[in-house]
């Protein structure tokens, strides 16, 4: 059973460009979470999605950030008009149910130049 | 939101020895979950151990065990017979059991981590 897949593993964007991060949950998992890790920090929750629904986006910045988890295909975290402060590692996690362990992907390291 | 505190930025242990990593948390909830995650240099987050707050018995996974003190809101991780492969960042995390009633929702709340060095 393949684990949580994230791509790309590394992404470099210039200021003002768009960053699109993808997450494919484990087979059978319909719950997806996105977290951001700044250098020397723990992970911070951004958004929680189920198929076609955003359940909790309380950790996501109100502007430039959006997330989706369509009926078919991976979950996407989109950052528009990136700034240097967006440079971080972005982790996706999935779970089979709401209250169960979250299994993490390898992360995408975003660098904004 | 619930706060998770790891007061030890760095710890060091010799191979085959035992080390304990500290974690405290702040909550008014009675039911919740606590976790320890390991993040090696590859940056992959790996679940080490999980504890349900309603269970009095401390969780154990092979060489990893926890000391869960609910009244003190303390959740320490003990690593026995340390191995070189245990070297990593260790994160303590909290999650509510009933997200609808919690101001932290479904999120895992992480501490800032403890960097564990294992020396031969």
Image: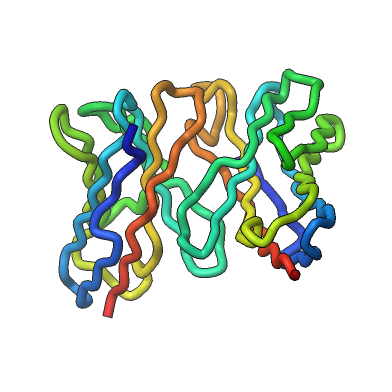
Q: Residue B117 location in percent, x, y?
A: 70, 67
**Which image quadrant for residue B67?**
top right
Q: Quadrant of the N terminus of chain B?
A: top right
Does B17 sit above or below residue A111?
above
Camera-nearest residue between A47 and B50? B50
Residue B119 is at least partly visible in this image: yes
Does A9 sit above or below residue B75?
below
Write the residue at 33% across / 59% down.
A108
Camera-nearest residue between A3 and B68? A3
Q: Residue furthest bottom?
A: A113
Write the residue at 15% across / 36% down.
A73
Name the image colouring: rainbow
Compared across the picture, whether A67 is left or right of B3 comes to left
Q: Residue B79 location in percent, x, y?
A: 76, 48
Camera-nearest residue between A23 and B25? A23
Compared across the picture, whether B23 is left or right of B34 comes to right
**Which image quadrant for residue A72?**
top left
Q: Residue B4 location in percent, x, y?
A: 67, 47
Write the residue at 81% across / 51% down.
B20
Compared across the picture, whether A39 is left or right of B6 comes to left
């Amino acid at each position: 059973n393949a684990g949580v897949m994230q791509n790309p593993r590394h992404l470099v964007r210039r200021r003002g460009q768009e960053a699109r991060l993808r997450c494919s949950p484990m087979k059978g998992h319909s719950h997806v979470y996105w977290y951001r890790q700044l250098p020397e920090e723990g992970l911070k929750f951004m958004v929680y999605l189920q198929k076609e629904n955003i359940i909790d986006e309380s950790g996501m910045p109100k502007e430039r950030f959006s997330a989706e988890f369509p009926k078919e295909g991976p979950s996407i975290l989109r950052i528009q008009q990136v700034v240097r402060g967006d440079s971080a590692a972005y982790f996706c996690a999935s779970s089979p149910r709401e209250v169960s362990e979250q299994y993490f992907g390898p992360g995408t390291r975003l660098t904004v130049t | 939101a619930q706060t998770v505190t790891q007061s030890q930025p760095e710890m060091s242990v010799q191979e085959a020895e035992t080390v304990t990593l500290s974690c405290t948390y702040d909550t008014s909830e009675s039911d919740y979950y606590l976790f320890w995650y390991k993040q090696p240099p590859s940056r992959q987050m790996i679940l080490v151990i999980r504890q349900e707050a309603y269970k009095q018995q401390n969780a154990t996974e092979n060489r990893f065990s926890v000391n869960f003190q609910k009244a003190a809101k303390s959740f320490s991780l003990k690593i026995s017979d340390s191995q070189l492969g245990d070297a990593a960042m260790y994160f303590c995390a909290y999650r509510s059991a009933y997200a609808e009633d919690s101001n932290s929702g479904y999120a895992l709340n992480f501490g800032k981590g403890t960097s564990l060095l294992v020396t031969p």
